[in-house]
């Protein structure tokens, strides 16, 4: 992680809420367990905190592309729900 990225997180963290929104088809494929994603989420929250920022939430779609779900990016469902659930305009 470069110093510039750390500085950016620190500066942006004073004004913005951070959310990670990601597709994780490895869950459906059995390559990663949801508990492992939970550990990753906690590690990321701690990492952001150490940079002077706050990671509000880690949102993920556990489905494969062919599952036809509505939460998978590039759809906007996860972003819309994150905004609604966390009071983001």
Image (spheres, helix red, strand yellow):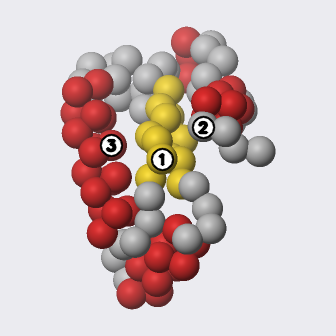
* Mark 1 secondary-structure assignment: strand
Q: Quadrant of residue 11?
A: bottom right
* Place of residue 83 in the rendered image (x, y in percent of width and height, measured from the top left): 67, 37
- Answer few, some or many: residues within 10 Å of disc 2's Cα (few below 14, many 20 plus, some between 14 and 19): few
Q: Is residue 39 visible?
A: yes
Judging by the rendered image, the residue that carries numbered circle 2 is 86
* Place of residue 85 in the rendered image (x, y in percent of width and height, measured from the top left): 61, 30
> How far is disc 3 from disc 2 in space, using C-alphas?
17 Å
In-front residue for pair 64/13: 13
**Residue found farthest to the bottom:** 3
Judging by the rendered image, the residue that carries numbered circle 3 is 41
* Place of residue 81 in the rendered image (x, y in percent of width and height, measured from the top left): 65, 28
Residue 65 versus residue 39 in the image, above or below: above
Whether the residues at callouts 2 and 1 have beta carbons within 8 Å, the answer is yes
Sequence-wise, the earlier of marks 3 and 1 is: 3
Residue 55 versus residue 89 in the image, above or below: below
| Residue 56's disc number | 1
Select label 3 or label 2 by which is in front: 2
Sequence-wise, the earlier of marks 2 and 1 is: 1
63 on left or right of 31: right
* Place of residue 45 in the rendered image (x, y in percent of width and height, measured from the top left): 34, 52
Tally of numbered tags: 3
What residue do we see at 41% from left, 79% from top? 6
**Residue found farthest to the right:** 89
In-front residue for pair 3/25: 3
* Mark 2 secondary-structure assignment: loop
- Quarter of the figure that contains the N terminus: bottom left
Residue 25 versus residue 4 in the image, above or below: above
């Amino acid at each position: 992680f470069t110093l510039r990225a750390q500085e950016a997180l620190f500066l942006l963290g004073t004004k913005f809420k951070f959310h990670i929104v990601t597709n994780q088809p490895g869950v459906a494929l059995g390559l990663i367990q949801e508990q492992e994603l939970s550990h990753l989420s906690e590690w990321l929250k701690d990492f952001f905190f150490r940079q002077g920022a706050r990671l509000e939430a880690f949102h993920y779609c556990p489905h494969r592309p062919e599952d036809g779900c509505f939460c998978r990016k590039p759809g906007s469902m996860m972003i819309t729900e994150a905004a609604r659930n966390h009071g983001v305009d």
